[in-house]
Image (cartoon, grey):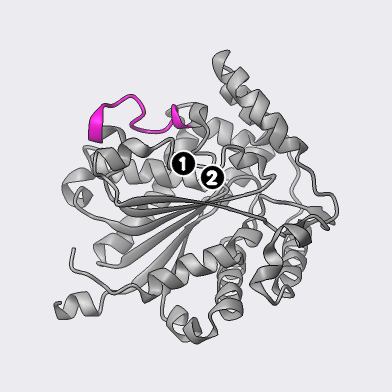
């Protein structure tokens, strides 16, 4: 192993989801605090090692906020920040990993499987009718715009994520790309661009990210996947070729990932030998937002024992020459 390989920086790049987002520094602080809390709770001996990991955020919240406001949506940022803080403090009080199970989840106020059940039924039907973006726009107007095609919004969002990832890869970092909700689709598209895009493949085509983590991801939905980059290509050009391991975490009752698994949908990636492993995990998200259960909340994913294990397993993995 060379000295350069020994000294390679490990970095986690977070790609947030859709809907309104607080300022960049606020979101970054919340996300890193939640991740740290999970490591402190379950792996206290790894806190020091986690502290040496670089943390970065591919932020496009200002672009999304502007679009949503243009559609008549209102956003009270101070209230949102306060409620996020309350949600995080409540999650931090869960002191044992075993308390993130079904028994405690069933006690949460406002818990409901109805939105996910509706998504299960409606998504295939709307897909057959060619109305997927209509369905998505009912709950996520910004994601519907992202999926609608080669819009300026789509270009700007991808550019924000792409620039951050390219910066880390150029520096030679060992990267964990952690994405939530809409951000998982954006991250996937950016990975595809770096693998196959004419403007990027010469420089980044051989680059690899250690782990692609998707939290509450809509990629498992067939109608969404058909709108991602590469969907109409053949063989290895259909998929990103720069992921070593994919860890997909989906929460019960999270309508955004109503189909909980990606390994079965993307098994061709394994068959084509463009990825080493794809693993699916089903969890319970204990986040409470505005007094009721919110199984899609990013904070509930970031602090979850499964995510803490994914992060620590990666930290403990020896750095190999690639």
Q: Quadrant of the C terminus?
A: bottom left
The picture places residue 129, in percent across and down from the top left corner, at 58, 13
User: On the rendered structure, is 226 left or right of 251?
Assistant: left
Residue where numbered disc 1 is placed: 262
The picture places residue 232, in percent across and down from the top left corner, at 33, 24
State yes or no: discs 2 and 1 in contact (Cβ < 8 Å).
Answer: yes
The picture places residue 122, in percent across and down from the top left corner, at 66, 24
Q: Identify the residue at horizontal 69%, vertical 61% (top origin).
A: 101
Out of 298 and 279, give the one closest to the viewer. Answer: 279
| Residue 70 placement: quadrant | top right
Q: Earlier in the sequence, mark 2 or mark 1?
A: 2
Q: Identify the residue at horizontal 72%, vertical 57% (top origin).
A: 102
Out of 160 and 322, give the one closest to the viewer. Answer: 322
Q: Identify the residue at horizontal 69%, vertical 51% (top origin).
A: 295
Residue where numbered disc 2 is placed: 217
Mark 2 and mark 1: Cα distance apart in space: 9 Å
């Amino acid at each position: 192993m060379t000295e350069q390989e020994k000294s390679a920086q490990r970095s986690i790049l977070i790609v947030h989801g859709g809907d309104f987002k607080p300022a960049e520094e606020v979101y970054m602080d919340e996300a890193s605090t939640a991740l740290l809390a999970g490591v402190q709770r379950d792996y206290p001996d790894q806190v020091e090692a986690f502290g040496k990991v670089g943390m970065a955020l591919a932020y496009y919240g200002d672009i999304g906020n502007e679009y949503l406001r243009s559609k008549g949506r209102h956003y009270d940022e101070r209230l949102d920040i306060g409620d996020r803080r309350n949600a995080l403090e409540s999650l931090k009080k869960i002191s044992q990993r075993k308390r993130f199970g079904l028994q405690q989840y069933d006690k949460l106020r406002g818990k409901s499987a109805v939105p996910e059940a509706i998504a299960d039924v409606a998504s295939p039907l709307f897909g057959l009718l060619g109305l997927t973006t209509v369905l998505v726009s009912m709950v996520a107007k910004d994601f519907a715009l992202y999926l609608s095609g080669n819009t300026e919004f789509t270009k700007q969002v991808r550019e924000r994520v792409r620039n951050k990832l390219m910066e880390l890869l150029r520096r030679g970092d060992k990267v964990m790309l952690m994405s939530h909700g809409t951000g998982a689709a954006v991250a996937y598209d950016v990975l595809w661009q770096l693998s196959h895009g004419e403007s990027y493949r010469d420089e980044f085509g051989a680059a690899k990210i250690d782990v692609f983590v998707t939290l509450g991801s809509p990629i498992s939905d067939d109608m969404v996947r058909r709108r991602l980059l590469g969907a109409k290509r053949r063989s290895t050009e259909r998929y990103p070729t720069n992921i070593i391991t994919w860890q997909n975490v989906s929460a019960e009752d999270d309508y955004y990932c109503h189909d909980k698994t990606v390994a079965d949908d993307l098994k061709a990636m394994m068959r084509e030998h463009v990825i080493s492993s794809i693993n699916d995990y089903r969890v319970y998200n204990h986040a409470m937002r505005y007094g009721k259960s919110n199984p899609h909340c990013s904070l509930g994913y970031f602090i979850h024992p499964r995510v803490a294990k994914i992060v620590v397993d990666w930290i403990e993995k020896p750095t190999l020459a690639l």
